[in-house]
Image: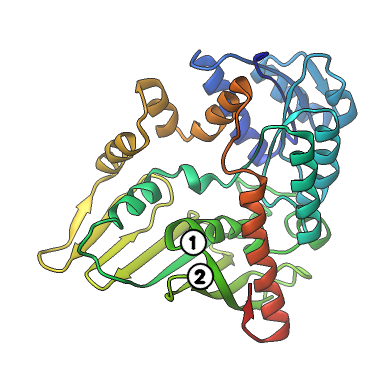
Amino acid sequence: MPEPVVGLIGCGHIGRFHSRNLCGALRSEHVPGTYDAVCDRDPARAADFAGFTGATTVTDSPGALFDHPRLNAVYICTETSEHPALVAEAARRGLHIFCEKPLAKSLDAVRQMVADVEAAGVVNQVGLVLRYSPVFMVMKDLFSEPDLGPLLTAHLRDDQFFPDHGHYASSWRADVEKAGGGALIEHSIHDVDLFRWLFGEITAVRCHTRYTSHRTGVEDVALATFQHEGGHQTTLSSIWHAIDGRPSLRHLEVFFEGGRFETEHDFIGPIRYQLRSGPEVELSADEVLERYRAIAGLDDTEFELARRGMLEDYLFLRCVNEDRPAFPDFRTALKAHEIVDACYRSARESRELTL
């Protein structure tokens, strides 16, 4: 297969994150490829990216980026409302696609995007980055302890300051026409995907939302209860606040009949846990990373990329290079969107909804 020749559309906060990761993955020489095109509606911002990446195509027009003669993969990191049309055009041209979450504002649009990439037969991946979080993969492994008994419940509190300023500096997340909603769809779609992965398929939801920051249609609180296939319930509190000095945190607490697990870090750790007998144990961040390395079977180069948060982009490039499916793909994201959509309907209708 031809090696990846990558372009990126959207040079904002999340675009910078992926741009850094792409450069790191390619410089590792563990995967071949070229990062050769950048696009942003602000030409100066695109030029700044090109100075860092060495891209030869620098433009404020997605069409000009798509016309790059060797391009075969594209990152879509724009505001949510622009994703569907960009994905449709990339798929029409046969380009492999990495699209940031959420895929779209509406469930119908997400379904169409899944149909577009699958009909085109292109590698597709979504930025549900918690799937590459060492702390959650290690927790998932700890949950396999045979003497834990049934899962009783879990609660996740996900909070961050409203991402329209500070290091996020988003110019569009306070606009419902561009974002589609607030804390639940824009941020906690990560958490919904995590709940499916850690605790099993979600079969029913009950959700409440609140709008306290005067950003029309953009909720800053969402409280959801999930019913899972195994008969257990879990809960999520998603919060956007105005405590600007507080970092973005995810506090997860899980109770089994014979064990309790807790973390407040959504990437490395530490993890605290206590089993049926004995004191509470703490796995340090370093111990979490070493366990993750063993579980994921990473070599030295891959482990260094994982430690620096670059693994999802490295693996997308590998999948493009080897022409094999990537993960998490658009269809996985669709499952999370179906649950988020049900949560919003539950909040509007003040009732539990079955999926």
* Residue type marked 1: Phe
Residue 20 percent coordinates (x, y): 58, 28
Residue 133 placement: quadrant = top left
The secondary structure type at the circle numbered 2 is: strand
Q: Is residue 303 above or below residue 31?
A: below
Question: Which residue matches tag 2?
Answer: 236
Q: Residue furthest left?
A: 278
Which quarter of the rendered picture does the C terminus lie within? bottom right
Residue at coordinates 48% horizontally, 54% vertically from top-left? 247
Compared across the picture, whether 252 is left or right of 294 comes to right
**Is residue 246 at all visible to an observer of this figure?**
no
**Is residue 203 at all visible to an observer of this figure?**
yes
Residue 108 percent coordinates (x, y): 80, 59
Residue 316 percent coordinates (x, y): 59, 30
Q: Residue furthest bottom?
A: 350
Question: Which residue matches tag 1?
Answer: 195
| Sooner in the amino-acid sequence: mark 2 or mark 1 | 1
Compared across the picture, whether 317 is left or right of 196 comes to right
Residue 351 placement: quadrant = bottom right
Instruction: Identify the mark at residue 229; answer none if there is no mark.
Output: none
* Residue type marked 2: Leu
Of tags 2 and 1, the one toward the viewer is: 1
Q: Nearer the viewer, residue 112 or 14?
A: 112
How many angstroms separate mark 2 from mark 1 (CA)?
9 Å
Compared across the picture, whether 61 is left or right of 188 comes to right
Q: Residues within 10 Å of mark 2 (few under 14, many from 20)?
A: many
Residue at coordinates 53% horizontally, 22% vertically from top-left? 25
In contact (CB < 8 Å): disc 2 and disc 1: yes
